[in-house]
Image (cartoon, grey):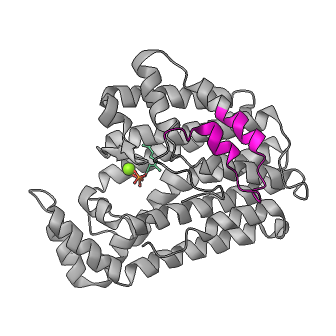
Amino acid sequence: MSFAAPPTPASDPHSGPAERARAAAPSDPLDPGLLERVEERLRAAVAADGLMGLASAHLLQAPAAKRARPRLFLAFAALAGDARAARPRADEALVAAAAALELIHTASLLHDDVVDEAGARRGAPSANARYGNSAAVLAGDLVLTRALGLLSFDAAALAAAIDVVGAMSVAAVREVEVRGVSALAPEAALAVAEGKTAALFGLCGRLAGILGHDDDAGRRFEEAGRALGVAFQIADDAADIETDLRERTPSHPILLAQAHDPDVAEALRALWSPPGVDAASARALASRIGGGAAVAGSLEVVAREIEVAARALAPWAGSLPHEHIFRFAATLSRRPA
Ligand code: FPP
Ligand code: MG
């Protein structure tokens, strides 16, 4: 899922962060110079010798990284500033906060791939597959501390980020606790999405309010960010049914399907029973769930959350950053191919 910038071909080995910043679409309201400063901050944040430097930079510098959270934050910051000028103030604090958001995301993925035992990420081997679990976990720790360090210039921003990292960790552990548990209501998946993904999207809004010294706007941005985060995660779940079945993750469309179709509930229970998941059965069940009403049900949740975001951001309707945010949102509600 892209955030307004054109996709960077993953196969192009020369397509690095600077190229990505320069490749911003002509109608992109985000200043490519500002995005390049964010990239510089990111490069500096993960500069370390040896294995630590390799493992930390591995995921952060992947060409397929979309920088969705810094872009969302900068769009909110543009709304908090002069929305008619359609770009945020080229402020050092904004650059630091945008970089911190990407680093928190990167740290969470480094840890998530260890937890999920994932072998690939962004079209390449995951950091844990390439450098081992120990290096990936410790690189995640380093990246997270660099993120929090970047926010230490503002006590409120730092406290908000610490809260969000806590919520993400609690949700990630909850996801581990319910692995393989099929008898859950679909709301259980929404609660995990709130903590795992929406909390960080909400922080994109909250930080724009804090740094723009506008509490009312910050509350609206946070609400919109959280709603877009739930939409993002549920859209991702709708696209990842087979993987989630294989990894025994009770995602939203899987729980919806089992709640409404007793045959799916029985097949799911059997799939997740010992001795282990059979890949062919997971593929068959994924195709059955994907062809049924559950995906449409999940996409209804996506649409509902986008409406929540639209109501929260209604005061800025018609501005370019607002258009930019909802162009991104529109990519979420399409049925996965
Ligand atoms: C990807 O989810 C993972 C997350 C959105 C967050 C995971 C959070 C933690 C591991 C807690 C630790 C947090 C920090 C900041 C160190 P997914 O598995 O649904 O998506 P995927 O298919 O892309 O892996
Ligand atoms: Mg994962």
- In the current view of this chain or complex, which residue is farthest to the left? 275
Image-based side of 79 in relation to 287, left or right: right
At a point 61% along the width and 51% down the height, the residue shown is 68
Exactly how many numbered labels are in the figure? 0
Tell which residue pokes out farthest to the top in this image: 49
How far from the left and from the top, in percent, is residue 87?
83, 50
241 vs 46, left or right, is: left
85 over 305 or under it: above or below: above
Span highlighted in magenta in the image: 13-39
Q: Is residue 243 left or right of residue 234?
A: left
**Place of residue 207 in the rendered image (x, y in percent of width and height, measured from the top left):** 72, 44
Image: 197 above or below 134: below
The residue depicted at 55 percent of the width and 21 percent of the height is 47
Query: Eyeballing the image, is 278 above or below 133?
Result: below
Which of the two residues, 281 or 230, is positioned nearer the viewer here? 281
Q: Quadrant of residue 2?
A: bottom right
Q: Which quadrant holds residue 157? A: top right
Is residue 103 part of the magenta span, yes or no? no
Q: Please indicate, yes or no, whether residue 307 appears anywhere in the rendered image.
A: yes
Indicate the quadrant containing the C terminus: top left, top right, bottom left or bottom right: bottom left
Q: Is residue 126 above or below residue 310?
A: above
| Residue 159 visible within the image | no
Q: Position of residue 46 (x, y in %)?
A: 54, 25
Image coords of residue 88 (percent x, y): 83, 47
The residue lying at 66 percent from left, 71 percent from top is 308
Q: Residue at x 16, y 67 (%)?
A: 280
31 inside magenta stretch: yes
Q: For residue 129, which quarter of the picture?
A: top left
- 268 left or right of 237? left
